[in-house]
C-alpha cells in the first residue's frame, strides 16, 4: 500500500477510524482509544498526516482545550482508493488460508471478544 497509495498501515488505520463516524472527525483522545495507541504516538503520527494533507485539526468549540482530528477530502480519497487493495491483501494473507469452518469460527470468536470489550468500563 505504501508504494501504490502512499499510505502506511498506520495511516490506513487512522483514516478508517475517522471515516467510520458520520462527520469524519473524532477528538484526539477518542481516536487514540479506538486505535489503542498512546496519545504521544498518535500526536506525532497526526502531525505527519496533517503535513501530507490527509487530516486536519480543529478546536472543539465547547471545550477550548479539546481538539478534533478530521479526515480531509484528500484523506478520504486516499482511503477509498486504497480500500480494495487492503481488502485483497487481508483476503490473500489471511482468509484464503482458512477453511470456511475456520472463518466461521474466527467470526464467532471475534464477535465474542468485541462484545466483552464493550462491557469493560473506561478507566481514567
Image (tube, grey):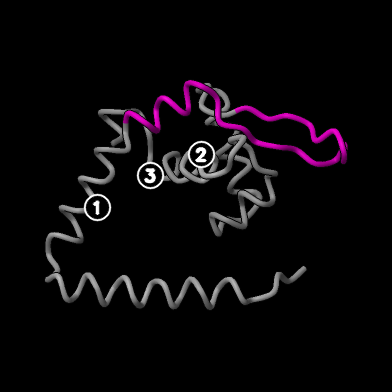
Q: Residues within 10 Å of mark 2 (few under 14, many from 20)?
A: some
The residue under the point 85% across, 33% down is 61
Position of the N terminus, as image quadrant, is top left
Q: In the rendered view, would you say 90 is above or below 82?
A: below
Nearer the N terminus, badge 3 or badge 1?
A: 3
**Is residue 47 magenta-colored?**
no
Residue 112 place in picture, x, y as percent: 44, 78
- Left or right: 123 in relation to 77: right
Residue that carries the numbered disc 1 in the rendered image: 90
Q: Are marks 2 and 3 in contact (CB under 8 Å)?
A: no
The residue under the point 24% across, 52% down is 90
Residue that carries the numbered disc 2 in the rendered image: 19
Position of the C terminus, as image quadrant, is bottom right
Residue 51 place in picture, x, y as percent: 55, 23
Q: Label 1's element?
A: helix
Residue 101's image quarter? Answer: bottom left
The residue under the point 51% across, 39% down is 19
Q: In the rendered view, would you say 38 is above or below 86?
A: below
- Left or right: 29 in relation to 1: right
Residue 113's image quarter? Answer: bottom left
Residue that carries the numbered disc 3 in the rendered image: 9
Alpha-carbon span between mark 2 and mark 3: 15 Å
Residue 8 place in picture, x, y as percent: 38, 39
Q: Are marks 3 and 1 in contact (CB under 8 Å)?
A: no
Q: Nearest to the eye among marks 3 and 1: give it.
A: 1
**Is residue 66 magenta-colored?**
yes
Q: Are marks 2 and 1 in contact (CB under 8 Å)?
A: no
The residue under the point 38% across, 72% down is 110
Query: Where are the magenta residues, as a range?
Result: 56-81
- Left or right: 37 in relation to 4: right
Q: Nearest to the eye among marks 2 and 3: give it.
A: 2
Q: In the rendered view, would you say 91 is above or below 84?
A: below
Amino acid at each position: 500500500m505504501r508504494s501504490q497509495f502512499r499510505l502506511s498501515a498506520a495511516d490506513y488505520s487512522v483514516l478508517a477510524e475517522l471515516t467510520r463516524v458520520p462527520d469524519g472527525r473524532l477528538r484526539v483522545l477518542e481516536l487514540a482509544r479506538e486505535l489503542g495507541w498512546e496519545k504521544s504516538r498518535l500526536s506525532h503520527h497526526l502531525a505527519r498526516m496533517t503535513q501530507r494533507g490527509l487530516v486536519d485539526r480543529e478546536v472543539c468549540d465547547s471545550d477550548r482545550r479539546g481538539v478534533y482530528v478530521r479526515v480531509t477530502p484528500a484523506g478520504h480519497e486516499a482511503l477509498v482508493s486504497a480500500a480494495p487493495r487492503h481488502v485483497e491483501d487481508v483476503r490473500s494473507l489471511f482468509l484464503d488460508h482458512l477453511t470456511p469452518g475456520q472463518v466461521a469460527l474466527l467470526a464467532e470468536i471475534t464477535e465474542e471478544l468485541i462484545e466483552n470489550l464493550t462491557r469493560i468500563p473506561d478507566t481514567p
